[in-house]
Image (cartoon, rainbow, N blue to C red):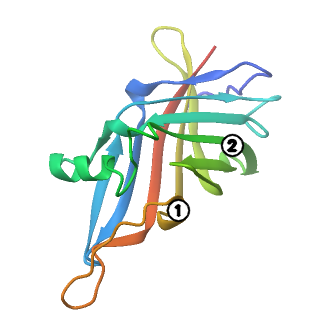
């Protein structure tokens, strides 16, 4: 792993071919459903050396949701959940705070549908490396949790036993590479 650091005011762009955006939600309280968003874009703009204080700008295309079940994906795109026709993007603008070596908190407003709430992600810098083509890249893994109901994703059904079909808590997982310049 290279010991290079980020340089001032140079934007790092998200590399979508080496990144993934994943979510997990409990189903019937007995198992977990995993989904992905396949189309997204973003950037990280440091304000000085390293990533402490950097600004994060991120957007994903809700229509790119993929849970490996076409009917479920169609339901998630409907007004019961994301309403992709009216709200085609989920956006996040955050600020990075370094908490320890290679460890960060990223906080800022997340907008889903027409609801915006402050969230916090725990992030870890996997390292900075120059690829075989001369591009300087940094890898991050970030995790967080949100309440889907807080963002207007309230659809649910009750089972015969009185349980719910979809849990409120949604776990977020980002595994991303950004490229300098």
Residue 35 image position (x, y, % from top left): 31, 50
How many numbered marks appear? Answer: 2
Residue 149 image position (x, y, % from top left): 48, 66
Residue 54 image position (x, y, % from top left): 74, 35
SS class, disc 1: strand
- Residue nearer the viewer, 80 or 16: 80
Q: Residue at x 23, y 47 (%)?
A: 74
How busy is the neighbourhood of tag 2: few (under 14 within 10 Å), some, or many (20 plus)? Answer: many
Quarter assignment of residue 18: top left
Q: Residue furthest right?
A: 48
Compared across the picture, whether 68 is left or right of 36 comes to left
Q: Which mark is residue 94?
A: 2
Q: Residue at x 71, y 26 (%)?
A: 6
Give the answer, above or below, for where 24 lies relative to 45. Answer: below
Q: Which mark is residue 146?
A: 1
Q: Residue furthest top?
A: 133
């Amino acid at each position: 792993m290279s010991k290079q650091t980020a340089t001032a005011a140079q934007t790092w762009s998200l590399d979508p071919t080496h990144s993934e955006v994943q979510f997990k939600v409990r189903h019937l309280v007995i198992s977990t459903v995993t989904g992905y968003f396949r189309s997204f874009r973003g950037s990280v703009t440091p304000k000085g050396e390293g990533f402490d204080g950097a600004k994060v700008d991120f957007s994903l295309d809700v229509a790119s949701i993929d849970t490996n079940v076409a009917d479920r994906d169609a339901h998630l795109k409907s007004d019961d959940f994301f309403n992709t026709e009216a709200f085609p993007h989920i956006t996040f603008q955050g600020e990075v705070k370094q908490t320890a070596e290679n460890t960060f908190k990223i906080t800022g407003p997340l907008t889903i549908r027409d609801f915006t709430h402050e969230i916090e992600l725990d992030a870890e810098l996997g390292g900075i490396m120059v690829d075989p083509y001369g591009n300087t890249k940094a890898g991050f893994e970030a995790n967080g949790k949100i309440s889907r109901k807080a963002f207007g994703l309230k659809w649910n059904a009750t089972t015969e036993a009185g349980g719910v079909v979809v849990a409120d808590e949604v776990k977020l997982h980002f595994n991303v590479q950004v490229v300098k310049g």
